[in-house]
Amino acid sequence: MSRHAPARLCLLALLTWAISASAGTITIKGSDTMVALCQRWARAFRDANPSVRLQVTGGGSGTGLAALVEGSTDIAMSSRPIAPIELERIKQRTGVDPVVIEVARDGVTFFVNPGNPVRALSVSQLAGLFSGDVTRWSQVGGDDRRVILYTRETTSGTSEFVRDHLLGGLDFAPIAQPLPGTGAVVNAVSRERFGVGFGGAAFSRGVVPLRVRVDADEIAPTPEAVKTGRYPFSRALTFVLARPAEGDVHRFLQWVASDEGQALVVRAGFFPLR
Amino acid sequence: MRELTQPALASRPTPPSGEAQRRAARWDLFVELAVTGAGVAGIVLLLLMIVFVVREALPLVLDPTQREQASLGKLLLPQPWRDGHPPAFLWNPTSKVPKVSVWPLVIGTLKVTFVALAMAAPAGVAAALFTSEFAPGRLRTWIKPTIELLAGIPSVVLGSFALMTLASALQATFGFDFRLNALVAGLAMSLAIVPVIYTLTDDALRAVPHTYREAALALGATRWETAFRVVLPAAAPGVLGALVLGVGRAVGETMIVLMASGNAAMVSANLAEPTRTLSATIAAEMGEVVMGSTHASLLFLLGAILFLFNLVLNVTAGAWVRARLQRREGAPS
């Protein structure tokens, strides 16, 4: 991308807004994590409602919310809570509070080989493992064997989520082995007795999901704990609107919350709302 | 070629009529042009490829932002990466503070290539010595095609074999900490380059004139002495060519290392630790890279390094072979 990219993006956003205002297109912009899910929704919704056009673009949660502040998108996808300053700016423009709607949940499971006696770790112990500060399982209550780390290639959204939420944006240990997909990580850990990896909770054949110790509790990554947010590595995936939805946007949101819409959430590797 | 074919044409018992002769000459010209064209096309394609790779990597030098993000210092010198840790050679171009050292990848490539060659060169050359010097004719007609069949196995199959079976077997046998490591990848890679080394070495050995063997045996050398002291040295340039092609294949091979090496980019001399090669890095990251970014230019730089490596290897080997041939033939220097 060149230095003019932001300017071009703004122009593009403005253009799409102009088009959407005239031709009944719903523009959705934001979180890269949510793009694939949202595109599934858009495709399925369009099949049922051919008159409605949906345009889904990524760029990150911040980009989506900035576009919402400018009024250049109908819906912002955000995988983080909206910041007070963003809320304030939107309110300044529209005069009403923006609407935040949870549309799905995202959770990351850490897993080990069944042959490893470790079953629960605290957040700081997990951070120690993946930053490389903890190199032996005996340091976290396991056998005196080396910790074998599996991560995802750095371009993966899951990898980024773990990096940001577990390591505070720092890099994984250089010795961590990046694999091309969650399936590959599960496969590797199922064969490596002292391996540890992470991925969506849907994949856990041949591996044992770790419970996360928070204070005195040990929380398993069950759909229930992910939904309520009790499980520490879970987050809400939200749509943010500048004002209450109406017309086609309202119909789309209702459809997303329906059983049909939520079924696609599972297929995209996330957790449904119910 | 021309000197050979033209007298042959001219010495035909019945010279053809003028019209047929002209047609034959036209056909000759056409074939010659076609063959020359094929040869030139090969060279042109190679040149275009080099131009393409270099052009894509050029922004690293020309673009001020990229020059700053991937300066020579960042590429070649250890960089700070975490408080309380010494600076290190790291490759992590998509991190918050990108790390772009090429050393982990270059060393990873050399490690895997070394293991592959250390396994494949003795095995391939020994097998070729056996089939060309010792094996009875019937056995040879079985062994050669079988080993050559190994070359037909897709590298993704070899990679899966290494990932699923070989890695577990080696870990169980030697008690490696890391299931996937440079040794597993190198071993799987040796399966891919053994047929290359074997076939070319066998051809080189069989091209040694029979008089050499007869002379050695007549002087009282045993079959083993003949094979090892006379035939093998005589075929040395061909054997070296086989090894160079084997190394070239190992350096560029992607799928096997991508699947079996563990892909952790770090500098270490330990063969039992995971490693990341140049080719695997390009394969893993090219699909997701933002075109025009420093990261993309860096991946093309890695490609250029691979190119340069093979070029140097081939030129050096070629020079060695020429010097060697000159010495053997006693040509005036």
Image (cartoon, coloured by chain):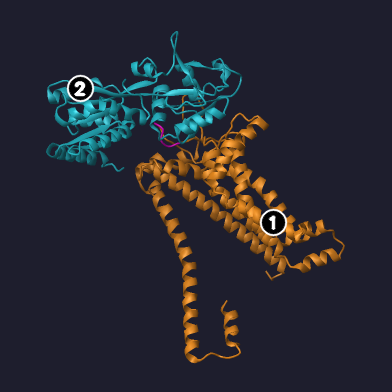
Chain colours: A cyan, B orange
On screen, residue A222 versus residue B228, left or right, reads left
Residue at the spot 43% in from the left edge and 48% down from the top edge? B300
Is residue B202 inside the magenta stretch?
Answer: no
- State the image coordinates of residue A212 (x, y, percent, origin top left): 45, 16
- State the image coordinates of residue A211 (x, y, percent, origin top left): 46, 16
Q: Which residue is mark 2?
A: A99
Of A266 and B285, the residue lying toward us: A266
Quarter of the C terminus of chain B within the rendering: bottom right
- State the image coordinates of residue B76 (x, y, percent, origin top left): 49, 40
Is residue B95 inside the magenta stretch?
Answer: yes
- The residue marked by circle 2 belongs to what chain? A
Q: Report the residue that reaches farthest toward the top.
A: A216
| Marks 2 and 1, how far apart at CA | 75 Å
- The residue marked by circle 1 belongs to what chain? B
- Identify the element where label 2 is drawn: strand
Amino acid type, label 1:
Trp
Relative to B221, residue A175 above or below = above
Specify the segment rendered in magenta.
B92-96
Residue B142's disc is 1
- Identify the element where label 1 is drawn: helix
Relative to A120, residue A66 above or below = below
Amino acid type, label 2:
Val
